[in-house]
Amino acid sequence: MIRSAVWFMIWSSTAFACDEIGQRMTSEVQNAPEVYLSVDEIPLAEPFSVLVSICSETTVGQMRVDAIMPAHRHGMNYTPKVSALGGGAFRVDDMLFHMPGLWELQVDVDINGQSVFYSSKITLK
């Protein structure tokens, strides 16, 4: 099975030190800025939105967003739309998890010229 990843990119500017709201995303990069994912409810097979907050006072470049189901080796069937809200906050619309199970939301952010990868596990029932 071929895994195709769809990344959506958007440019931003300087982020800010934010409140710790939502689920903290993980990164394997030492001393990476904290990133939080906030979502109210995730419906099955219906579009939803998430808020991604980058908690840093550094320059943020591109942000790419994707979600995969590791056990099934596939991702979403739709391309999400990312909007910069300013101050290190981004709204990601048109996310759609088309089946229940374990999903991994992935965010790749260019921070001070370095690509920093974050992920967060989400189980949809």
Image (spheres, rainbow, N blue to C red):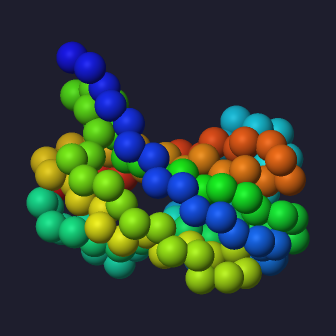
On the question of residue 85 being in view, the answer is yes
Image quadrant holding the C terminus, namely bottom left
Query: Which residue is rendered at x = 29% and y = 51% of the image?
Result: 123
State the count of labels: 0
Q: Is the residue 109 above or below the residue 91 in the image?
A: above
Of 70 and 5, nearer the camera is: 5
Residue 53 locus on image (x, y percent): 62, 71
Residue 111 locus on image (x, y percent): 79, 53
Query: Which residue is rendered at x = 81% and y = 72% of the image?
Result: 14
On the question of residue 25 being in view, the answer is no
Q: Is the residue 100 above or below the residue 19 in the image?
A: above
Residue 57 locus on image (x, y percent): 87, 70
Residue that sits furthest to the top in the current view: 1
Q: Quadrant of residue 44?
A: bottom left
Q: Quadrant of residue 58?
A: bottom right
Residue 114 locus on image (x, y percent): 80, 43
Q: Is the residue 16 above or below the residue 63 in the image?
A: below
Compared across the picture, whether 5 is left or right of 94 comes to right
Image quadrant holding the N terminus, namely top left
Compared across the picture, whether 67 is left or right of 113 comes to left
Compared across the picture, whether 25 is left or right of 94 comes to right
Compared across the picture, whether 25 is left or right of 51 comes to right
Q: Is the residue 18 above or below the residue 72 in the image?
A: below
Query: Which residue is rendered at x = 47% and y = 67% of the image?
Result: 82
